[in-house]
Image (cartoon, grey):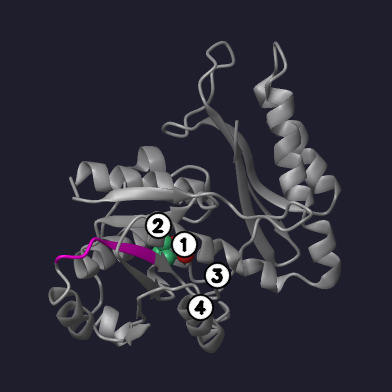
Amino acid sequence: MQVFHTIAELRAYLTERKHLKRSLVPTMGNLHAGHLALIAQAKANSDLVIATIFVNRLQFLPHEDFDSYPRTWDDDVKALSDAGCDVLFAPNETEFYPEPQTFKVHPTPLLADKLEGEFRPGFFTGVCTVVMKLFQIAQPHIAVFGKKDYQQLAVIRAMVRQFSLPMDILAGETLRADDGLALSSRNRYLSAEERQAAVFLSKTLRAMADAAQAPNADIQKIEADALQAMRDKGWQPDYLAIRTQQGLQAVDAAKREPWVVLGAAKLGKTRLIDNFEF
Ligand code: PAF
């Protein structure tokens, strides 16, 4: 696997391999099996897989975990190389943002200001800005993002569509631990006791999806009861919501479209997110 830390080196390498169909898998490192499944998906759909590792300051709020975000460089390089990744692009902050990034990509508030965006204002502007820049640098034919970050995937798809970017976005399924907890870099923050309790988020979301499929289901009550159930267990939920898969709109119980249940909640100091389509 080739490792590049500068944009110029990566571009020079890619210019010589223009004929290859290339895929991009953007990450912030601290890789787990979920990321490696995205690499496998990229490999199956292209000739040259480029993974990126860059902890993007622009998508963290001042009180969030930018400084403590787990950085596991040696393990990540080995995991990517073992997974057959061809190129790793890992710029430092001065390389990626040599001057303050005052030009930004602001996604539509209709999609980006709710759910995650309500609790992490500016998050999707940070994500879109870094992803757009990575797209410009690597010019991939394909980019792969996990469904675990469901709203992020929807926002990126909309960005690619509205800017007519010449690439396909592939969605990777969420990988789960045996008890159902979605794999996430932030699971690392959980104490042993919290790790045992953490499955309650996915269980709650599954129960909400089941309840929503009953005839005459009262969606608002399902959401309110689930919020209360999580609070009763000592969690601090930000949102637990049943939305349309298309556009993440409030659902109309009389009109059965494809839905998704999404949730974000804090267990102790760790904020977890998850979702299920149904
Ligand atoms: O999902 C992530 O890890 C990040 O939001 C991404 C897409 C790599 C952008 O920094």
State the residue position of label 2. 44
State the residue position of label 1. 40
Which of the two marks, 4 or 3, is nearer to us in this view?
4
Tell me, for residue 64, which label it has, or none.
3
| Residue 95 found in image quarter | bottom left
Of callouts 1 and 4, the N-terminal one: 1
Task: Check disc 2 and give the amino acid type.
Answer: Ala
Mark 1–mark 4 distance (CA, rounded to whole Å): 11 Å
Task: Check disc 4 and give the amino acid type.
Answer: Asp
User: Could you tell me which residue is drawn at 80 percent across and 72 percent down?
Assistant: 191
Mark 3–mark 1 distance (CA, rounded to whole Å): 31 Å
Mark 2–mark 4 distance (CA, rounded to whole Å): 15 Å
Q: Is residue 122 visible?
A: no
Q: Secondary structure at mark 1?
A: helix
Mark 3–mark 2 distance (CA, rounded to whole Å): 35 Å
x and y percentages locating residue 64 in the rendered image: 55, 70
x and y percentages locating residue 63 in the rendered image: 55, 70
